[in-house]
Amino acid sequence: MSLFKKWGAAGAALLLAASVTACSGGGAPASAPAKNGGDAKPGTTTDKPADKPTDKPVELVFWSLGTNGYEKLAEEYKTVKPNVTIKIQNTADQTAHHNNMMTALTAGKGAPDIFMLEIAFLEKFLEAKDKFNNLNELGADKIKGNYLDWKWKQASSPDGKFQLGLPTDVGPTVVYYRTDLIEKAGLPSKPDDFGKEIATWAKFAETANKYKEKTGKPFVDMPDLVFNGVRDQGNEIYYNDKDEFIGDKNAQVKKAYDFTVKGIKEGWVGKNQLWTPEWAKDTNDGGFAVMLAPAWMNGVIKGNAKDTSGKWMITQMPEGAGNWGGSFLTIPKESKNAKEAYEFISWLVGKESQLKSYVSNGLMPSIPAVYDDPKFKELKDQFFADQAISVEFAKATKSVKPIRYGKLHDATDAIVKESLRNVQLKGADPQAEWDNAIKKIKELNKRS
């Protein structure tokens, strides 16, 4: 994900549902990945491309999403390929962005040469992969080994023969916390010490109760992010690789639900909702001490809590990280310049460009080799008490498991979270709310 303030994802799957019919996809057999990390250079990403990229003037239309700094890199690409001009059309409205693409694919005209695809919408576009170039046929299989394995697999067909997109950024989850508030509660505030204090969910709950007793305030900001933190540690969530609903049988999902209910009942979970002014104010005013959130959230915290610079730090999630967000760059078949488009995107998401995107815009790289670069790991952040937060993000990234979300993930997730809100705000019975949520989800699946 690229630093969006709003997802609007709950209805996204439904908005997209009426569009492109799924077809079977072909694809060249995958070959051995590149042994060395680093950037894909124009002209070296394929062994024998069917057609050589032209040296004639080429304009590539690129639909991008969110604040990513790609405009500056596109200008820099002029020094690499002077004959190629990148025309970027950017938006922050990700629902409209993906719906516009589906409309273009369905109409068979109007698609760009390059399309930035957000993970929340990925499954629907994988169904329509016959409308896109198989990037393995353009050379992607040669650079596969440069990227995080779990990230790469998200945009692959189950057999790995079809690659829909090249990975941009990732969103590993970490624990953001206010050191001053933690210290006032008599708790250890250094990242390693605080990490040990909350190393398991059981210890997290014990610490949360200590904080609540000392301060009278919630330990964490909201139910949604507690639920996500536990939910995303499993190998599956609501749907299996056949897109069958398994959420009612998945013990990790029920564990996440029950743990969040425990926090609500014990009073250490705040009543905020994402992206609301109240949540932003609480973030700045010390309404809570801990936020469980992805790497890209650091920019949101800085924006919401300007008065607290130097008081935040980061440590690892209890029992391991999950992932929230991240995008891919795809090339629709409609493009007349697929070779040139592939050359550009393989350069744009290469090691050096990803490092620049992280430094300039906070996009967490999907290439592990970046994590060892001194420019990355020694980068300190004044807002986070001069902590090298890149190192914490990198640690988290390496523990993420590959998960397929399923076309109805967001709509399903919204139903479960509505039940948690009913428990917290209406005092509803947790088991009755769970049973009702499962019933609604099964009805949703029947209708879809």
Image (tube, rainbow, N blue to C red):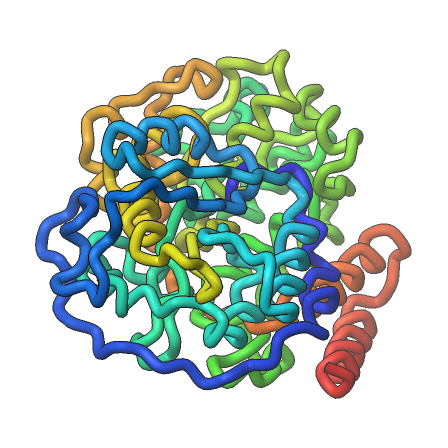
Is 41 displayed left or right of 346 in the figure? left
Q: Quadrant of the image for the C terminus?
A: bottom right
145 or 383: nearer the viewer: 145
Residue at the farthest front position: 56
Q: Is residue 243 above or below residue 268?
A: below
Which of these two is toward me, 289 or 385? 385
Give the side of residue 332 with respect to residue 308, left or right. Answer: left
Q: Which residue is at a point 45% across and 85% down the rendered structure image?
A: 24
Could you say where residue 376 lies in the image, as x and y percent from the top left? 27, 29
Q: Position of residue 113 (x, y in %)?
A: 46, 53
Percent of width and height locating residue 294: 50, 43
Q: Is residue 307 visible?
A: yes
393 in relation to 302, above or below: below
Which residue ends up furthest to the left in the rendered image? Answer: 35
In this view of the protein, which residue sits in the foreground, 4 or 128?
A: 128
Q: Nearer the viewer, residue 27 or 303?
A: 27
The x, y position of residue 326, in whole percent, is 47, 50
In the rendered structure, the answer to whether residue 108 lies left or right of residue 32 reads: right
Q: Is residue 254 visible?
A: no
The residue drawn where x is 67% and y is 63% is 103
Residue at 9% x, 56% y: name it: 35
Farthest residue toward the right? 426
Image height of 388 relative to 4, above or below: above
